[in-house]
Amino acid sequence: METHIYAVGGGVVWSETTERRKPARDVERWFNTDADRGPLGPFPPEILAEIDAHWALSLGKMDPLPDTFGLLGAAHFTGAPFARKHIVDVFEAYSEGNCQIVPIKRLWSLEDDAEVTEPYFVANVYNAAPVVDLDKTRVLEVKNPKSGELFFQRHAV
C-alpha cells in the first residue's frame, strides 16, 4: 500500500474511556498541539504515562484504516505524526536519531464501536533542519483575508 502526501487521513481524539470526552472549558490539555509550539525533545515521562492511560478514538471506520491520522503535511513537522509503522519508520530514518517512537496501546473506532488492533505509533521527531534558503527568499507582508491582520510570508525568488 502506498501513501501519497495528499492522501486523506482520519481524525483522532483522546479520551479516558472509549467514548468522546466532554471536557470543561477551563480544563488544561495534557498534550501539545501544533499551535502550542511545544519544545523540541523527547516526551517527558508524564506525557508518556498520559498516552498509555488514554484511548485514542478514531473518528473514521476501520475499513479502510488510514496510514496516518490527519494529512501527512507540514503540520507533522511541528507536531508528532500519528501513523502506522511504515510511515513513522520514514520519520525515524531521516531524523538522524532525534526521534522517539511511541506505541499507541489503546485505539478505538467510534464508527465501528470496536477496538482497532492494527498497531499505530506517534513519531515524536525533534530534529531541526534548515529547509528555506533565507538568502534566496524574500519576505512579503500579506493580509489575512479572514481577519484583515498582517502576517509575513516567505516566497522563493
Image: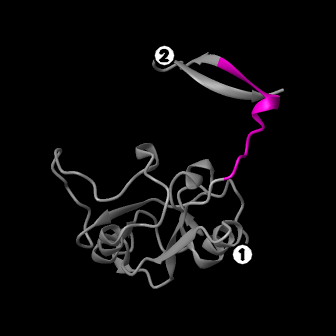
Label 1 residue SS: loop
Q: Is residue 109 magenta?
A: no
Q: Which residue is mark 2?
A: 149
Q: Residue at position x 43%, y 51% from top?
A: 38
Nearest the viewer among 3 and 155 is 155
> In the image, 103: left or right of 21?
right
Nearest the viewer among 115 and 55 is 55
Q: Which residue is mark 1?
A: 1
> In the image, 135: left or right of 12?
right
Label 2 residue SS: loop
Q: Residue at position x 63%, y 52% from top?
A: 73
Q: Name which residue type carries label 1.
A: Met
Give the magenta range: 129-140
Q: Is residue 139 magenta?
A: yes
Q: Residue at position x 69%, y 28% from top?
A: 154
Furthest residue toward bottom: 117
Q: Quadrant of the N terminus?
A: bottom right
The percent position of residue 26, horizontal first and vertical second, equals 16, 45
Nearer to us: label 1 or label 2: 2
Residue 3 falls in image quadrant: bottom right
The percent position of residue 141, horizontal first and vertical second, equals 62, 16
- Alpha carbon of mark 1 to alpha carbon of mark 2: how far? 43 Å
Residue 112 falls in image quadrant: bottom left
Q: Residue at position x 68%, y 52% from top?
A: 129
> In the image, 84: left or right of 27?
right
